[in-house]
Amino acid sequence: MNGRHNSGASSVRGIILLASSLFAASLATMRAEERLIGTRPPEWQVEHWLNSEPLRLAELKGKVVLVRWWTAPGCAFCTASAPALNEFYREYHSRGLEIIGFYHHKSEGPLRVKTVKRQAQEFGFKFPVAIDTDWSSRGPPRPATIA
């Protein structure tokens, strides 16, 4: 032997360990998602609505509802998906599709309702938009200062 370690075997063990960890994490995620199937979501706790009076989940029973969480400005995915959301709303709203945009504030500065309204108008949103100031409709609260 020349005193060198078998780095190939170490690399393979490392890859196997990483793959097993990722597989276990994906199984845990799938199990969590499976537990959500068939459960009723909690009612939305949203104060500010654009393009609509406040909506309640019970009012949407029996409809197909597409909820799009979005942020702005500066969200490339929000900008890229806005035309498709508008097209879906134009084409399918009369046949029962409801689209609801939930704005989640991620900017460092204070949340300004008029800024969100302007961005929703720039995106061309005609469907209801909720401004979820404390992220209560998705995950743990992230309070935002409203200016």
Image (cartoon, rainbow, N blue to C red):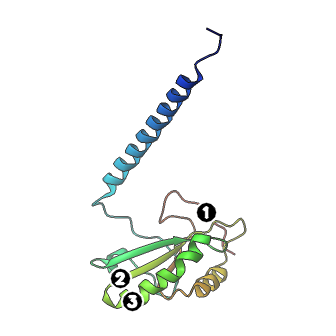
Amino acid of disc 2: Leu
Residue corresponding to mark 3:
91
Amino acid of disc 3: Glu
**Picture coordinates of residue 142, whole percent (x, y):** 59, 60
Q: CA distance from mark 1 to mark 2?
A: 31 Å
SS at circle 1: loop
Within 10 Å of disc 1 (Cα), the crowding (few <14, some 14-19, many 20+) is: few
- The reply to whether discs 1 and 2 touch (Cβ–Cβ < 8 Å) is no
In the displayed structure image, the side of residue 82 where residue 34 appears, left or right: left
The disc at residue 134 is none
Q: Quadrant of residue 131?
A: bottom right
Q: Earlier in the sequence, mark 1 or mark 3?
A: 3
Q: Earlier in the sequence, mark 3 or mark 2?
A: 3
SS at circle 3: helix
Task: Report the mark closest to the observer, 1 or 2.
Answer: 2
The residue closer to the viewer here, 126 or 85, is: 85
Name the residue: 70% across, 70% down.
110
Q: Quadrant of residue 123?
A: bottom right
Within 10 Å of disc 3 (Cα), the crowding (few <14, some 14-19, many 20+) is: few
- The reply to whether discs 3 and 2 touch (Cβ–Cβ < 8 Å) is no
Q: CA distance from mark 1 to mark 3?
A: 35 Å
Residue corresponding to mark 2:
97
Name the residue: 42% across, 41% down.
23
The disc at residue 143 is 1
Task: Report the mark closest to the observer, 1 or 3.
Answer: 3
Name the residue: 29% across, 77% down.
61
**Picture coordinates of residue 73, whole percent (x, y):** 66, 74
SS at circle 2: strand
Q: Earlier in the sequence, mark 1 or mark 2?
A: 2
Work out whether residue 48 can be spotted.
no
